Amino acid sequence: GIPDFVKIVEVGPRDGLQNEKSIVPTDVKVELIKLLVSSGLSVIEATSFVSPKWVPQLADAKDVLEGIQDVEGVSFPVLTPNLKGFEAAVAAGAKEVAVFPAASESFSKANLNSGIEDNLARCRDIASASRSYSIPVRGYSFHFSIVTCQSLQKSYDIFRGFLYISCVVGCPFEGHVAPAKVAYVAKALNEMGCSEISLGDTIGVGTPGNVSSVCCHVCFFSYIGFDCSGAVCTVVPMLEAVLDVVPVDKLAVHFHDTYGQALSNTLISLQMGISVVDSSVSGLGGCPYAKGATGNVATEDVVYMLDGIGVKTNVDLGKLMQAGDFICKHLGRASNSRAATALSKV
Ligand code: HMG
Ligand code: MG
């Protein structure tokens, strides 16, 4: 059944902002995080200690952490791709980090400039370093990921802004990520001691179906001529495969809403016993220049749904909307949250 309490991991300041072309000033990021804190959120992914060449928007990671150092009672995990990032994060006062290996070889290369195994080795290094500081490590296991390479990026502007990458030229194209591969990465993250493992539908193609033997021929993969045999688009078999190897209380889900499926996918994950949901205030994320590439499921919509079905989150929707309003005004953009848009007209 659905859990009584769901922990929301707010990823707006990191996942939501990382693709924004124009640099958001540090004080705006800090103010956003503080507004999110006042809404009652207990975990807010604050920023990333990644290469500023890859993600220029988050080059001020150290200053953002400095700006929130006095905020107590809230976890602020930060993304760390390697030991260099981990050490910088610790020096800046991070108390929780997240590693993010991919379940797809080519995506791993595009996002991290190295393959799955190399990345898992880096994650292990981070995990063992973190033990000496008693720092919990969160792990992302991407699924439904897709390679991004320069030629593809030119042809399909859905990729533009999807990630800031110095693209790997001519890498092989890999659409389908088998549930077993996601499970493999999730298991590895669990074994290296990750406190939580978040399953990410990076480009939002997943549906809440449970049939993995047919290709629906309508998603992005089919559009570019890839027959995925259904497995790439169905969340349930992926969750089942992961649940076979990782305890349910260690899992989180991370759905991007590119195809409008994120809330349905969230609900089906809750029905399968998962009680941690990643989301982004106002559905921030994606890129204004990228047709179709959108952000995470909007936190307001998740809270609205959970309030409606009687699941506690300890998040105040009205205050959350104020945080959403603040950042949307700054970005000069309408909210991607349906609930916030509707409620602001009431
Ligand atoms: P690389 O170029 O292979 O790194 O990038 P390198 O080790 O060869 O070093 C190259 C340069 O980067 C050097 O500087 C290093 O010092 C520097 P230079 O000598 O040229 O001046 N460098 C760093 N600088 C700052 N922080 C660091 C760092 N490491 C090296 N940590 C690297 C490899 C991993 C650094 C790069 O690929 C990278 O930063 N990737 C991050 C990509 C990223 O952040 N993607 C978005 C997040 S993932 C996501 O959004 C998905 C998720 O939401 C889940 C989902 O949706 O499914 C999590
Ligand atoms: Mg994401």
Image (cartoon, rainbow, N blue to C red):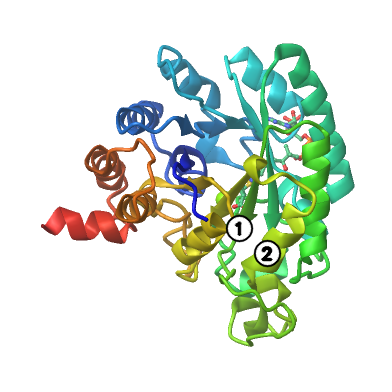
Q: Earlier in the sequence, mark 1 or mark 2?
A: 2
The answer as to whether callout 1 falls within 8 Å of ligand 1 is yes
**Residue at the location (71% across, 19% down)?**
87
Residue 96: % across, % down: 61, 24
- Determine the residue positioned at 82% across, 64% down: 171
> Is disc 2 surrounded by few (<14), some (14 to 19) or many (20+) residues within 10 Å?
many
**Where is residue 167 drawn, in percent x and y?**
71, 56
Q: Quadrant of the C terminus?
A: bottom left
C-alpha span from label 1 to label 2: 7 Å
The answer as to whether callout 2 falls within 8 Å of ligand 1 is yes
In the image: residue 117, left or right of residue 270: right
**For the point 64% across and 74% down, which residue is it?**
210
Identify the residue under disc 2. Answer: 144
Task: Classify residue 87 as left or right of residue 294.
Answer: right
Q: Is residue 149 visible?
A: no
Q: Which residue is mark 1?
A: 202
Task: Identify the image quadrant of residue 99.
Answer: top right
Q: Position of residue 154 (x, y in %)?
A: 63, 70
Image label count = 2
Pointers 1 and 2 in contact (C-beta within 8 Å): yes
- Which is nearer the eye, 2 or 90? 2
Residue type at mark 2? Phe
Label 1 CA crowd tier, 10 Å (few <14, some 14–19, many 20+) = many
- 228 and 209: which one is in front? 209
